[in-house]
Amino acid sequence: MKMTITSRKIALTLRIWLILLPMKNIIIEALSIGRRKVINKATTSMTGLIFSARPWLLPDPATASNDSADRRNTVNPSYISYQIIPDGSKKLNPTLKPISSSDLSKIFSMAKSKNGGALWLGEHHNSAMDHDLQANFICCVHDERNKGGDPKMAVGLEMVQVQFQPVLDAYVSGQITSEEMRRRVEWDKRWSWPFENYLNVFETCRELNIPLIALNVDSEDLGLVETGGFPALHREQIQKYIIDPSGFAEFAKTRYYKTYVDYVISPSYDLHKELGILRTTI
């Protein structure tokens, strides 16, 4: 997790890996706890929630619309959700229990939490349906938090590098257009996946005045680490990403962090390196 969630706020982080299943099923867990405990819990428990974007089914007639604005503003989700019931026995045979979309939105909104929390939304970068579902989710969570009297929330974007945070701020405040944002964050060079597929998410956040937070590492810094490791970065560069060095160092000693790195970070990095796409953006 690359951002601090302040008290009484919720952040939705788009495309942060947690657990992925076949058939575009995405495991998501909403927790009202700190970042370190989130990873701890994620690596020690299979309790969570699963929802399907249903790419193999038609949209619900009640929510289907050709108008993207209608899809953004609706708070009637068009997805099916289940709760995973873990099995701690030797059989290791977890089961699924249906959970209503309204109950899911209430859980994810964390409206009653005094500590805030974070929510991971997985995606297939080239799937417009996944991004429409994300926009729908943002609307639902925002609506639930409005009902609770505390609409504060933010959406974190893996697609945008941290050096471009001022551009996102200008976009949400209405100072620049979406096309100007695309150009100024160097989207086509540094991310390259279809910008149009994400537009629903961006416009939803601007309409609801939800801050967009740049989460990705700057390509220039990634290139330095790829060739020279962390010693290649100056202290100022490291502090952009690790705002609590002492706390991070302590957490990195735990088996939970090692498990997270071994099963999530390292395989992803190796795959990106094998595909030759680590430094193609600089």
Image: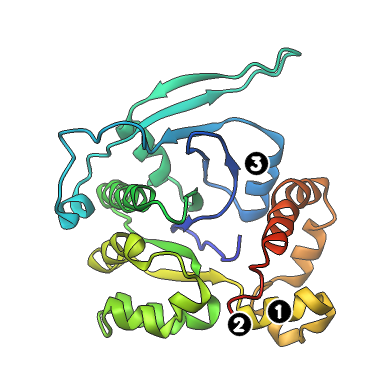
Q: CA distance from mark 1 to mark 2?
A: 8 Å
**Location of residue 87 (image quadrant):** top right
Task: Check disc 1 and give the amino acid type.
Answer: Gly
Label located before the other in sequence (1 or 2)? 1
* SS under mark 2: loop
Task: Check disc 3 and give the amino acid type.
Answer: Ala
Give how far across and how far down residue 158 sits, in percent.
Answer: 52, 64
- Residue 215 vs residue 271: left or right? left
**Location of residue 10 (image quadrant):** bottom left
Give how far across and how far down residue 198 sits, in percent.
Answer: 36, 62
Q: CA distance from mark 3 to mark 2?
A: 33 Å
- Residue 132 vs residue 127: left or right? left
In this rendering, the answer to whether 250 lies above or below 212 is above
In this rendering, the answer to whether 282 lies above or below 142 is below
Judge the density around disc 2: few (<14), some (14-19), many (≥20) Cα neighbours within 10 Å.
few
Label located before the other in sequence (3 or 2)? 3
Q: CA distance from mark 1 to mark 3?
A: 29 Å
Q: How is the image coloured?
A: rainbow
Residue hosting label 2: 282
In this rendering, the answer to whether 250 lies above or below 164 is above
Judge the density around disc 1: few (<14), some (14-19), many (≥20) Cα neighbours within 10 Å.
some
Task: Give the quarter of the figure containing the C terminus.
Answer: bottom right
